[in-house]
Amino acid sequence: MSDLLQRLRERGWRMTSQRRVVAEVLDGEHVHLTADEVHARAARRLPEISRATVYNTLGELVALGEVTEVATDGRARRYDPNGHRPHHHLVCASCGTIRDVQPAGDPLAGLPVEQRFGFTVTEAEVTYRGLCPDCATAAESPAAVEG
C-alpha cells in the first residue's frame, strides 16, 4: 500500500474507488502533477472518473493537509503528496519540473530577527530556481546558441 493511501486510511478517510485512484496517481517522491495530469492518469485506470471528482478530491486532500498546492511562476497549480514532511522545492525555470529537497539546517535561522518585523515565524517555504539537467544541456547545445 502506498504511503499516501496508508495515511488516508489511518485518518479514516472514506476510500471510494475514485478517491483511491486519485491517491494512487499522486503517490510517490517528486510527484507534482497538475489537476489535469491527475485526471488524465486517473482516467487511464478508471475511465468513468470525472474531472469534477478529481478537482473535488484534490481539494479535500489539500484541506486535510495530506497534499499541498504548489504554484510557481504563473504556471498551473501542482499537487504535492509530501505535504506531511517539511521540504522545499527546486524548480526548473524553463520546463517547470519540480523536485523536493531537504537542505540541511533550519531555514528560519537564515532570517535575522530584525527582518521578521515582529512576526512569530513558524515555517518557511523556500523555492530554489534554476535549470534542470535536460534544459541546461539544451541551453548549452550549439543549436540553442545558433537558434
Image (spheres, helix red, strand yellow):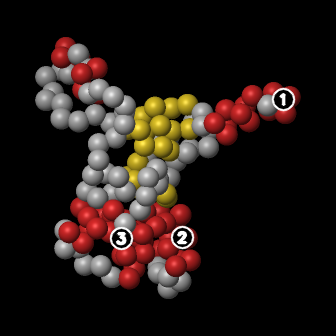
Q: Name above or below for residue 134 compared with residue 11.
A: above
Q: CA distance from mark 3 to mark 2?
A: 18 Å
The amino acid at mark 2 is Arg
Q: Residue at x 49, y 57 (%)?
A: 33
How many residues crowd mark 3 within 10 Å: few (<14), some (14–19), many (20+)? few
The amino acid at mark 3 is Met
- Outermost bottom residue: 48
Where on the picture, by quarter, is residue 5?
A: bottom left
The first of marks 1 and 3 along the sequence is: 3
- Closer to the camera: disc 1 or disc 3? 3
Q: CA distance from mark 1 to mark 3?
A: 47 Å
| Secondary element at tag 2 | helix
Q: Residue at x 61, y 43 (%)?
A: 95
Q: Quadrant of the C terminus?
A: top right
Q: Can see residue 77?
A: no
Q: Name above or below for residue 8 compared with residue 74.
A: below
The amino acid at mark 1 is Pro
Would you say 131 lies left or right of 125 here?
Answer: right
Q: Name the residue carrying label 3.
A: 1
Q: Residue at x 50, y 74 (%)?
A: 42
Residue 51 picture location, percent across and down: 47, 74
Would you say 117 lies left or right of 96 here?
Answer: left
- Outermost front residue: 1
Q: Name the residue carrying label 2.
A: 41
